[in-house]
Image (cartoon, coloured by chain):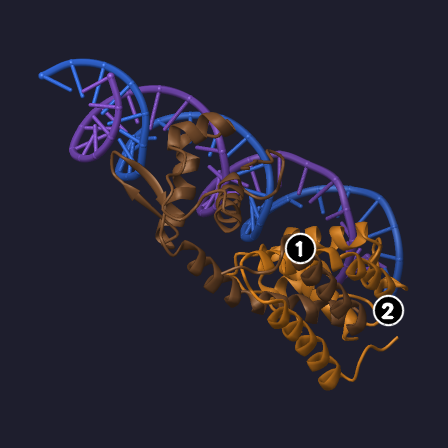
Chain colours: A brown, B orange, C blue, D purple
Amino acid sequence: MLLIDKFSSKPVYEQLIEGIERDILIGTFAEGAQLPSLRELSAMLSVNPNTIQKSYAELMRRGIIQSAHGSGCYVAVGAKDILRREAAGRLGELTALVRELCLAGVSAQDIVATAVEAANGYNEHEGGNRQ
Amino acid sequence: MLLIDKFSSKPVYEQLIEGIERDILIGTFAEGAQLPSLRELSAMLSVNPNTIQKSYAELMRRGIIQSAHGSGCYVAVGAKDILRREAAGRLGELTALVRELCLAGVSAQDIVATAVEAANGYNEHEGGNRQ
DNA sequence: AAAAGTGCACTATATGATATAGTGCACTTA
DNA sequence: TAAGTGCACTATATCATATAGTGCACTTTT
């Protein structure tokens, strides 16, 4: 379910993008399905339509959703693949974060243990990665 | 060495904070040592003194540096311990990032391998965590 | 054909964060 | 005494973010 934290330091349009990405990944928004309209989502979340549009435009630019003028916006077929590919590219963030923590004196053991627990914990509860 | 990327999306004052933290951790700025003065650092980096002051104020708030009015700013004794403690608290970021990647379909194996490589790579080149 | 809903492109406005510029003062050190 | 220090001001400019409102071409539904 899409939720906006009005007091978050993260901009609303970014929260919206991440929320939609998440809903696509967990299947709330299936590939090919129609997304809420700008006005509908605007009313649901009490967010300005322009802000919704900004989020949709960014997702379109990345090929994750598609718009049919006059009809609506739809989750692109292959959206999950795109998100998967993008996530793989983000492994560099993981490397950077681990190095930062190492530099500050956090033990490699604690770091790896945390990573393993987070990854396995996800698999245990969610049933692993489906494709 | 402190360096500012004028074109980074990260604010100058944040880059400065992280740069100073890093220099404290690697020993460029030893505990008890005097930091560059506001005006000196301002001239060195071509950054407004007010911006330097903002970074110093934040580091003071966290107990990492101390100021002696009229004398200068100094790295606090125990600064490394504070940074270490703060870093340990950031393991939650690692958990969040790993879960995000899992959700997007990156395999637990790839994630853990990346974390191990980053942590070990650090230890090999830097000689492990010193205290 | 008409009505309603859709994306989308505008303009205008407000706010907060960021950064620069400049001045001044109390304090410490040489 | 002079120079250097932190620090507190004010003012200004810019950019990102967000809201508000209007309008239009398009599609779908009635």
Horizontal and vertical percent for residue A92? 57, 69
Residue B85 or B95: which is nearer the viewer?
A: B95
Determine which quarter of the picture holds residue B129: bottom right
* Residue B110 vertical placement versus B125 (above, below): above
**Closer to the camera: disc 1 or disc 2?**
1
Horizontal and vertical percent for residue B120? 72, 80
As drawn, the label of residue A98 is none
Q: Quadrant of the N terminus of chain A?
A: top right
Residue C23 or C8: which is nearer the viewer?
A: C8
As drawn, the label of residue B31 is 2
Determine which quarter of the picture holds residue B109: bottom right
Residue C6 or B107: which is nearer the viewer?
A: B107
1 and 2 marks in contact (CB < 8 Å): no
Q: With A89 as the anchor, is A31 left or right in this view?
A: left
Cα separation, mark 1 vs mark 2, equals 32 Å
Q: Secondary structure at mark 2?
A: loop
Residue type pointed to by label 2:
Glu
Dot 2: chain letter:
B
Give the residue pinned by disc 1. Answer: B96
Residue type pointed to by label 1:
Ala
Determine which quarter of the picture holds residue B92: bottom right
- Earlier in the chain: of badge 1 and badge 2, it is 2
Q: Residue at x 38, y 32 (%)?
A: A38
